[in-house]
Image (cartoon, grey):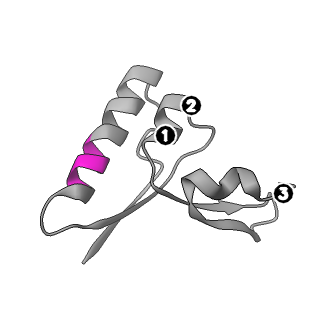
Amino acid sequence: AGGGQDEPTSGLDAVMGELVCVLLRQLALRVPKRIIMCSVHTPSSKMFRLFTHLLVLTSQGRLAYTGPREQVWRTSLSV
């Protein structure tokens, strides 16, 4: 079973937004592990590092990248 949340950090300041992402990561890593999906627009660098996998869309909604966060920099993105 997976969970999804559209923009869970919307309207929050940076500290609270990061806290929400920390809590989502902790939920994902509990046994049994869960897949948690959410959309976050312009995350801080701290928040960005909390995610293990990314799905990046272009401004037209097309897939630009999907995969491990560590490898996104190897991809030429023109979003």
Residue 54 pos. (x, y %): 56, 59
Q: Is residue 43 visible?
A: yes
Sequence-first tag of 1 and 3: 1
Do the residues bearing badges 2 and 1 touch, measured as CB atoms within 8 Å?
A: yes
**Range of the magenta residues?**
23-27
Which of pointers 3 and 2 indicates the residue nearer the eye? 3
In the shown orientation, is residue 28 left or right of residue 21?
A: left
55 to the left or right of 8: right
- Say which mark, if any, is on residue 49: 1
Residue position for label 3: 76
Residue found 24% across the figure and 78% down from its top? 1
Label 2: which residue? Answer: 45
- In depth, the one of 16 and 70 nearer the eye is 70
Give the structural element (helix, strand or loop) at label 2.
Answer: helix
The disc labelled 1 sits on which kind of residue? Answer: Arg
Taking the spot 31% from the left edge, 39% from the top edge, the residue there is 22
Q: Is residue 4 left or right of residue 71?
A: left
SS at circle 3:
loop
Query: Does residue 24 belong to the magenta stretch?
Result: yes
Residue at 78%, 60% (x, y): give it. Answer: 58
